[in-house]
Image (cartoon, helix red, strand yellow):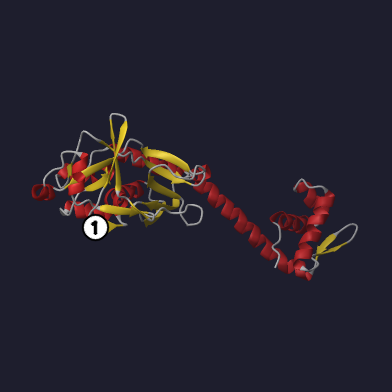
Amino acid sequence: MKIPRIEDLQLFIHAADRGGLSAAARELDMAPAAASAALKRLEGVLQARLFVRSTRSLRLTAEGERYLAYARQILQAVEEGAASVARDAQEVGGELNLSMPSDLGRNVLLPWLDAFQAQHPMVRFRIRISDRLADLYRQPVDIAIRYGEPEDSTMVALPLMPDNRRVLCASPAYLKRHGRPQALVDLQHHNCLRYVLGDTVHDRWIFHRNGSIETMTVQGDRICDDADLVRRWAVAGKGLAYKSALDIRADLKSGKLVALLPELDGEPAPLNLVCAHRLMLSPSVTALRTFLQESLKEPAN
């Protein structure tokens, strides 16, 4: 079934209200021929005659009378929808479909989102927590909070914490049992807790020293596709972990985890807010980004 054009419905309603096609055309700034074509097109879609026409008058048929009420409802719904979108484009409110990593999401971001929502009660969240990257084109996700730069250069990436890095760490209990590594090569003799990113095991740990890159391939008895579980294993003393500093900053402050090999700089892990297009940067998204940037400046609890 064909769907009528909105502009044809507008012409039909104006013609019915004004009692003439010429008056409706003038009001809509249309040429008479274009107005006549619009009416014929609408009647073709509906397979019905909407007006009885003469040289001097235009009168609705029975079908036209019946359809006029529906046409008004359609046009009103379209106008209300456009007004709603326009309001959302100007106000901090509406639903945000948000994707975030498991560890950072559960342990750092969720309390901040509660605080943001308390400041902006018109905002509604729909949250997807996973270490698998959401497809912003195919999945119902407006924005994603991600580590690293997006592989797709068409994505818009706004920095939240560009200088974040990974940190080699372990619990005091693990270090008491197995000793503290003194050099990168010592990782070969430790149980390293690895995670899966996408379909790849993250077992090549990259470090920076004075402008050069040093890499160590590590082994261990545990692998998981949930970074939060890797952090929990590390806190429980099951091995060494190589985690984003943001994920473990509260554990480092409390002493549950200890940073190791401080002479090495960890691999960069910049945190970004990512969306598919700049049109997605609504006032709600902009306000959320500002709120998260300020929250990231505060020390860990």
Q: Residue at x 48, y 52 (%)?
A: 136
- Whether residue 301 appears in this view of the structure is no
**What is the three-letter code of the residue carrying label 1?**
Arg
Residue 122 vs 212, above or below: the answer is below
User: What is the residue that sits farthest to the left in this orientation?
Assistant: 176
User: What x and y, as percent, mark residue 249?
Assistant: 23, 43
Residue nearest the viewer, comparing 249 with 86: 249
Q: Secondary structure at mark 1?
A: loop
- Whether residue 295 appears in this view of the structure is yes
Residue 235 vs 215, above or below: the answer is below
For residue 189, side relative to residue 246 (left or right): left
User: What x and y, as percent, mark residue 89?
Assistant: 51, 45
Q: Residue at x 68, y 65 (%)?
A: 69
Q: Residue at x 21, y 54 (%)?
A: 232
Q: Which residue is mark 1?
A: 222
User: What x and y, as percent, mark residue 91?
Assistant: 47, 45
User: What is the residue that sits farthest to the right in this orientation?
Assistant: 55
User: What is the residue that sits farthest to the bottom in this orientation?
Assistant: 62
For residue 275, side relative to residue 266 (left or right): right
Q: Residue at x 27, y 57 (%)?
A: 223
Total numbered labels placed on residues in the image: 1
Question: Which quadrant is home to the N terminus?
Answer: bottom right
User: What x and y, as percent, mark residue 41?
Assistant: 78, 60
Question: Which quadrant is home to the C terminus?
Answer: top left
Q: Residues within 10 Å of mark 1 (few under 14, many from 20)?
A: some
